[in-house]
Amino acid sequence: MSEVFPGEGWNKKLALERGSAMANEFKEKGVNVALGPAVGALGRVVTGGRNREAFSVDPYLSGALVYETVVGMQNRGVMACTKNFIANEQELHRQPVGDVTAVSSNVDDKTMHELYMWPFQNAVLAGTASVMCSYQQVNNSYGFVVSDWGAQYPGSGVSSALAGLDIVMPGPNLWGGNLTKAVRNGTAPESRVTDMAARTLAAWYKTGQNKGFPRPANPVLYQGADEGHVLVKNRNKLPLKTPKMLSVFGYSAKAPDQSAPGVGTGGRNAWALGLLATDTREILLRMAGLGDAPIPPIAINGTILSGGGSGSTTPSAYLSPLDALNQRAYKDSTAIFHDLTSAAPAVDPASDARIMMGNAWAGEGYDQSVLRVEYTDNLIRSVADQCSKAIASDENLSSKLPYTDAKNESDYGHLLNPDAADGVYKYFPQSNFDEGVYIDYRRFDKENITPRYEFGFGLSYTTF
């Protein structure tokens, strides 16, 4: 369940139960530290690749939900690692490549504290056992501090230890015996290494890693899925009540054709990184810094089960949207027809409802390439003027948008796309947060821009 689901539910109780349920899964697998929750990226850049991994673009809402998540995880005996600290708002230039350095996020003190640091403060107040640093540079504790994979850059061995880094994830081998040498030659004090161990072990005992297995929490997947849907328009077509005939369209209604480690293009990497519904070869090439084709804007090979990269999961069992619809259709004696491949499918006019399913792809290492996907828009137009985005449900949709949906891409201004290396900074990319706290709905309010759907918007059924 993505963090954006409890974000759309605005539900602290769900965040707490979700944290507990995830911790149980980690505990069953023998995992001591969960690499989450994520509250960075906050969502400054509209096409930011990792926005969907966090709760909301609003720091107060994000902070309230991360607090409950940390408590839920650690009460079950698993250490939380809140990430990615801090101002990690784009994937473009997130790491050094060749002669180009990682992007520098240049943030003033007021904006840093009121916007980007606020959710991390809530995580600290909740007692998060650790914090993961982001890749990019910043101009500008609690528990232990851990690096991301490969994020301890050459030449930073001693300096990163002195700056407060406690644990290094796989990457350049700068510590190990080198850290011992640094203590012996006086460039790093032994007290700093002792402090690293003390912080890590303190988190171990704080979360009860030395105690028994916790009792399982109640499943929250269904509630999370329910609250992860926001109803933005309803022309008296919803809710559906035992329809006689449904027609389903769109590439995102089906499960990926392959879901197993070691199969298809990319093999285990594609499976482990949540890429099976995508153009796997191109995504893997781009992640390795080898491809130059534009990032595909959609996952054309099926529904997106999770975020890509380290935000991915590999469920052993799941239902695609079409699978779930078929189960409900069988129960209600509803005829259901589908065409998931045609760009302009034929529609049976006798259908009580036409359900169209598309998606938008982005993930760790790559920002969203476009906001509007022409292929999906054309597919929707070709189906019928009566098109439903929701499914037959026993629950009343009542969730709310955790971000702003603009009428035009231009309404987002310079925050639509990430900052690229350019001009005198072509080797030292800069991202200047000159807008201050005025991102998302704050910008729309300040500039008097009317959105399509405002932050916090969400309809409910008038009768149910």
Image (cartoon, rainbow, N blue to C red):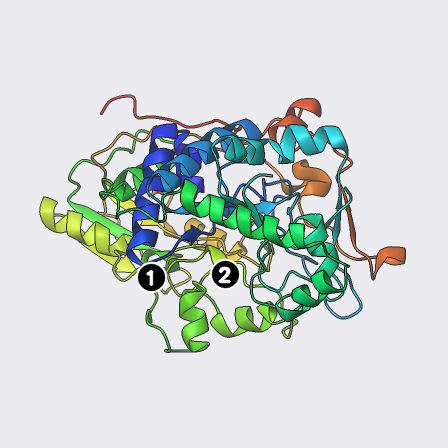
Give SS at disc 1.
Answer: loop
Q: Which residue is drawn at 24% across and 32% down?
A: 395
Q: Nearer the viewer, residue 152 or 83?
A: 152
Q: Which of 290 and 165 is in front in this view?
A: 165
Q: Which residue is drawn at 49% across and 43% down?
A: 129
User: Furthest-right residue in view?
Assistant: 424
Q: Which of 187 and 234 is in front in this view?
A: 187
Real-space Cα distance between discs 1 and 2? 26 Å
Q: Residue at x 64, y 46 (%)?
A: 89
Which residue does the numbered mark 2 point to in the structure image?
Answer: 309
Q: Is residue 199 left or right of residue 192?
A: left
Which residue does the numbered mark 1 point to in the structure image?
Answer: 340
Type of amino acid under label 1: Leu
- The answer to which of marks 1 and 2 sits earlier in the sequence is 2
Q: Which residue is drawn at 71% across and 39% down?
A: 413
- Where 294 sits versus 114, above or below? below
Q: Nearer the viewer, residue 109 or 160?
A: 160
- Where 216 sits versus 276, above or below? above
